[in-house]
Amino acid sequence: MKPLVVVLILNLILLIFFGLTKIKVPNKITPAFITLYFAVILGILALIAAVFPEGGIKLGGETKIQFATLDELFSSQYDNESRDFRKLKDIQNLSAEELAEQMVDATAVVDTIVDTIPPVKEKLSFLQLQFPDNDRTILYPAFRAFDQAGAASQPVRVLHYGDSQIEDDRISSVIRNELQKKFGGSGPGMIPVVPFYTYYPFSYSLEFSEGWYGYPFYWSKDASVEHKRYGALASFYQFTPYLADSLPLPVTENEAWVLYKGSRIGFPGTRTFQKCRLFYGYNKLPFQLGVSTDNNLLKADSFPATTGIQTYQLNFDEPISNLHLSFRGVSSPQIFGIALDGLNGVAVDNIAMRGNAGLIFTQMDIESLRKHYQALNIKMIILQFGGNIVPDVTDSYIAYYERMFCNQILRIKEALPDVSVVVIGVADMSVKVKTHFESYPKLDKIRDAMKRASFKAGAAYWDMYQAMGGKNSMPSWVKEDLGRDDYVHFTTKGAKMIATMFTGALLTEYNSYKKQTSKTEDPVP
């Protein structure tokens, strides 16, 4: 129960008390009377705070009456926010490249003179990536691919999987922009044909016809789909309803279309693309596809019935900003995604899975997943999960989640052995306790479990919880308009800051890799 409510109730009680007794209220309110009046109210409040159980009084079920403690009652302001958040004030306006220049080179030999390390570098060490047995070389295969991306025959790909924290491409778009500025590339990456739920993509705009059917594996899985072939996006879409093999095929022809455009609010690099790849398969009957841009038909093709995941690719002579795809057929193929990229450079895919904890990879068909992965030239996979298990989680489930999350990374590496995996740990999340917000009680344990799982599976780990400022840091983020008022998700501004800090940490490791490789390539005197 809030003290303000209690004060109002006490005022009412005192007024009734004065009315029922012979105590007369002075006709003229004097300072002495006001002082006495408030002293009585504060005394009653202090008495209630002193005797009221700290854990509150349960009324049954989840209903509970709580009252402020003496410290909370008489403090001028209850401030439970993280002091570590202040470390972030100086870096809010830095790019990832600038941030990487400020951060400590963890592989460098430190000079014995302490003054050689600027203070700003010392305080940014909490943003660094962490590695199993401090083995930073697990990212070197990806860094080598980044170095060669500008001259590659196809884009070097980074897949960014996550829960609702990465929806609308808010975090992925910044990572993509920073990597494409450094290593080249264009386009929004691989995207689903149409969104499964209300979605406001930052990096592209989308128009589509009626008649599309979505089948995501990660949320509200359709029980009529008897297989587990879902591909890299963990979903597929059709322009006719899915039919099991035992059901008769339809006879009526269907049509559907989709139009992709570069977003005016997105980063400039994503507004155009020069390569389109359609990933489809398992169509029982032929279908037709028409490809247009600026209302000009570029190509019309027919596709026979197929098994397995197939790739249809188009390269354009010049970068384009819009693409219209029209499909027609009696039975639709399963469409696993459309990649809109540059001819080379780096591509970053945003794969947001609302409500998911990231435990789906061991459940999907590994052969179809491997087939799709291999067609995409993936060199790095980022996993950003954990938030959906934070509320009301038990210690036994945390131990289970640690084992299962480790298995997900191992399954990804089974499908793609040479890939570098980076885990972005859980963010700080707050729950309201009486009059203020605190970190969820088990959040530290979930963070530690995810780190252990990452290290066991040979993945790098970035501690987002620590980067935000640690325990009780989310209220500071909300106060600075970096976190939403649900005290769980980031605002667009906050997502950009998180993405910049993460990419800065990644580029710090890349810079260290470049220094190490330049030493080994120097001729021996």
Image: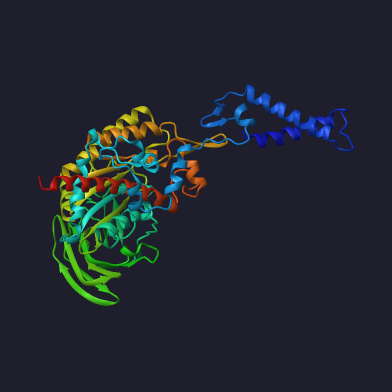
Q: Is residue 159 visible?
A: yes
Q: Residue furthest right?
A: 27
| Residue at image point 46% right, 41% down | 85
Q: Is residue 92 above or below residue 465?
A: below
Figure coloring: rainbow
Q: Image check: 371 left or right of 75? A: left
Q: Is residue 397 left or right of residue 476?
A: left
* Residue 458 spot, x, y in % from top left: 21, 37
Relative image position of residue 145 (x, y in whole percent): 18, 52
Picture quarter with the C terminus: top left
Residue shown at 46%/49% (left/top)?
482
Residue at left offset 26%, top offset 32%: 403
Q: Nearer the viewer, residue 98 or 404?
A: 98
Q: In the displayed image of the protein, which residue is found farthest to the top?
A: 51
Direction from residue 38 to residue 94 in the image, left or right: left
Classify the position of the N terminus by image quarter: top right
Q: Please provide percent x and percent y for residue 340.
A: 26, 63
Number of numbered discs overlaid on the protein picture: 0
Q: Nearer the viewer, residue 245 or 300?
A: 300
In the depicted structure, whether residue 34 falls above or below residue 301: above
Q: Is residue 486 visible?
A: no
| 144 or 6, nearer to the observer | 144
| Position of residue 519 measured from the top left corner of the image (x, y, whole percent) | 17, 45
